[in-house]
Image (cartoon, rainbow, N blue to C red):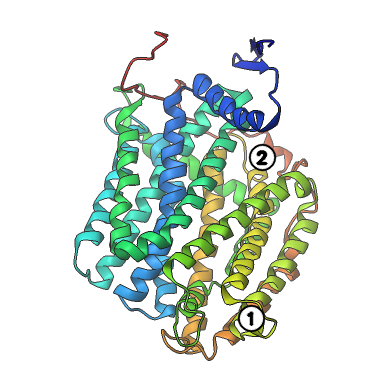
């Protein structure tokens, strides 16, 4: 046999790339991602890759999946709240994600004990551990305290998310040829984590209950503390705290100047309205899914599997956009995705009216189709907005401004959740009464079509075209991080190769 040759090539950016003869067949399909993963571990240090896996894959992907199913059953079976109330509380728990720019600015301009990242990881993980253990071991927290604890857990995940984003951005700057690989690693670990999390969430809820699931969620938060403890970050003992206030002011001025530009505020307004007008009635549907009298009476395991398959639909939507739709103009793409998104809600209407049974389609199979289509179309609808947001960020404050745009999206999500709660309450959809749930779905579907009349706010250009005016593109922001050193996690043991 001829031994496969592998050679190292130094690219212009200073990164070492590996060229090898590709393997064929199943072995090649398995070895390719392993070799890619190994390459990232060598170039970026294995411990940075581990940090991404912990925060994106375990804490966010798997943790969010377990938290979503656990929270649904906790509100329904432990706190015994109405669907409309659960919608409102969902919005409150989501508030820490709305203030993401504040977390981002803090990690950038306010070091603690001379460190910019380590204390925030430790703080985020500690909040999560305390919150999850408190709600898990307490027999029954008062509702207000339970919401506060769940919001604290959400804050821990949000702070860890912003901090690992900063680490990934720094490594993308230091290794520009690997920037896309870093983002692919983040997206891949998050998707796999969500798939695994949803797959096991229903099983754990059935075996140990929602409070037991919250206890398990202390493990991902604990791993985040470990990430912060092992982070090898240069200390800045002579940092001037008197400059912190000025940096916040400079960042605010730069963002306000950009937001006043029509090329920016018009797409931002569309993004908010398109999300806020798509009312969320997920809790009403969840209560109906699990109702033994009027609904399909789905078990905890079935609910988890349904959301797991739905996450596959979301992943397929991202792949479809990347390979087929990414070069289409924003306005055309948003027109068709928003239209299909509104029409896809008809599946929910058919399910609640039990039309699927008249066609001989079992409830479980139809719910799987419904969730998969909904997740895929939702992803296709969101991807162009995400790309458009990245094109609206001025040079110098890209990270902070992008976090601001994501906060606008999060405000839209909260508005949609609260609006859906008001709708369910107005139509008297309760824990046991679902007579008007079909009407809530119909109203939601019609509202999903209203953003079509607001598409004039979106530019006609595509992802490759410049959107910002020249004067903003040529202006450098004043907020820059002075930290230039690479960020790595301290190894628990020395590297075996001695390097």
Residue 385's spot in the image, x, y percent? 66, 53
The earlier-in-sequence mark between 1 and 2 is 1
Residue nearest the viewer, comparing 271 with 369:
369
Q: What percent of the width, then of the height, locates residue 424?
A: 49, 83
Residue that label 1 marks: 349
Between 87 and 475, the one nearer to me in the picture: 87
Describe the element under mark 1 as helix, strand or loop. Answer: helix
Q: Secondary structure at mark 2?
A: helix
Residue 121: x, y in percent?
34, 38
Query: Which residue has dot 2 on it?
Result: 472
Q: Is residue 221 visible?
A: yes
Residue at 66% across, 33% down: 26
For marks 1 and 2, give the one nearer the viewer: 1
At 39% from the left and 41% from the top, the residue drawn is 106
Q: How many residues crowd around disc 1 within 10 Å: few (fewer than 14), some, or many (20 or more)? A: some
The x and y percentages for residue 144 are 27, 70
Q: Which quadrant of the rendered structure holds the C terminus? A: top left
> Who's the residue at 65% across and 59% down the image?
376
Badge 2 crowding class, 10 Å Cα cut-off, few under 14, some 14 to 19, many 20 or more, is some
State which quarter of the image contains the N terminus: top right
In this rendering, the answer to whether 338 lies above or below 292 is: above
Farthest top residue? 498
Residue nearest the viewer, comparing 300 with 271 = 300
Residue 91 sits in quarter: bottom left
Q: Give the Cα separation between the discs numbered 1 and 2.
A: 47 Å
């Amino acid at each position: 046999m001829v031994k496969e040759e592998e050679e190292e090539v130094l690219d212009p950016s200073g990164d070492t790339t590996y060229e090898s003869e590709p393997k064929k067949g199943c072995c090649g399909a398995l070895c390719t991602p392993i070799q890619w993963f190994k390459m990232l571990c060598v170039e970026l240090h294995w411990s940075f890759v581990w940090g991404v896996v912990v925060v994106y894959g375990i804490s966010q992907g798997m943790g969010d999946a377990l938290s979503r199913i656990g929270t649904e059953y906790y509100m329904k079976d432990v706190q015994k709240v109405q669907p409309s109330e659960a919608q409102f509380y969902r919005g409150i728990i989501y508030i820490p994600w709305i203030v993401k720019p504040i977390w981002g600015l803090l990690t950038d301009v306010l070091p603690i004990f001379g460190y910019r990242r380590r204390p925030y990881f430790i703080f985020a993980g500690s909040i999560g551990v305390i919150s999850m253990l408190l709600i898990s071991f307490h027999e029954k927290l008062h509702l207000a305290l339970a919401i506060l604890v769940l919001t604290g857990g959400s804050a821990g995940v949000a702070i860890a998310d912003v901090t690992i984003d900063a680490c990934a951005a720094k490594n993308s700057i230091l290794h520009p040829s690997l920037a896309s690989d870093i983002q692919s690693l983040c997206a891949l670990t998050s998707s796999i984590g969500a798939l695994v999390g949803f797959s096991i969430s229903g099983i754990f809820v059935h075996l140990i209950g929602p409070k037991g699931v919250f206890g398990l969620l202390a493990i991902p938060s604990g791993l985040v503390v470990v990430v912060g403890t092992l982070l090898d970050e240069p200390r800045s003992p002579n940092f001037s705290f008197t400059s912190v206030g000025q940096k916040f002011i400079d960042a605010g001025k730069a963002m306000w100047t950009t937001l006043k530009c029509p090329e920016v505020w018009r797409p931002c307004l569309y993004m908010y309205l398109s999300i806020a007008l798509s009312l969320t009635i997920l809790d009403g549907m969840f209560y109906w899914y699990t109702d033994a009298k009027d609904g399909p009476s789905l078990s905890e395991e079935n609910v988890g599997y349904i959301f797991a398959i739905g996450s596959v639909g979301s992943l397929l939507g991202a792949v479809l956009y990347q390979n087929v739709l990414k070069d289409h103009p924003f306005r055309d793409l948003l027109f068709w995705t928003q239209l299909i998104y509104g029409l896809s809600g008809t599946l929910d209407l058919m399910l609640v009216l039990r039309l699927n049974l008249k066609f001989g389609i079992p409830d479980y199979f139809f719910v799987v189709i419904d969730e998969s289509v909904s997740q895929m179309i939702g992803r296709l609808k969101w991807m162009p907005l995400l790309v458009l947001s990245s094109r609206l960020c001025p040079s110098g404050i890209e990270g902070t401004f992008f976090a601001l745009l994501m906060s606008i999206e999060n405000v839209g999500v909260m508005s949609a959740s609260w609006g859906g709660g008001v709708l369910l309450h107005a139509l008297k959809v309760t824990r046991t009464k679902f007579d008007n749930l079909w009407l809530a779905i119909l109203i939601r579907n019609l509202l999903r079509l209203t953003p079509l009349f607001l598409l004039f706010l979106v530019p006609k250009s595509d992802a490759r075209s410049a959107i910002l005016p020249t004067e903003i593109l040529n202006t450098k922001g004043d907020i820059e991080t002075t930290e230039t050193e690479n960020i790595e996690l301290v190894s628990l043991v020395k590297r075996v190769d001695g390097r």
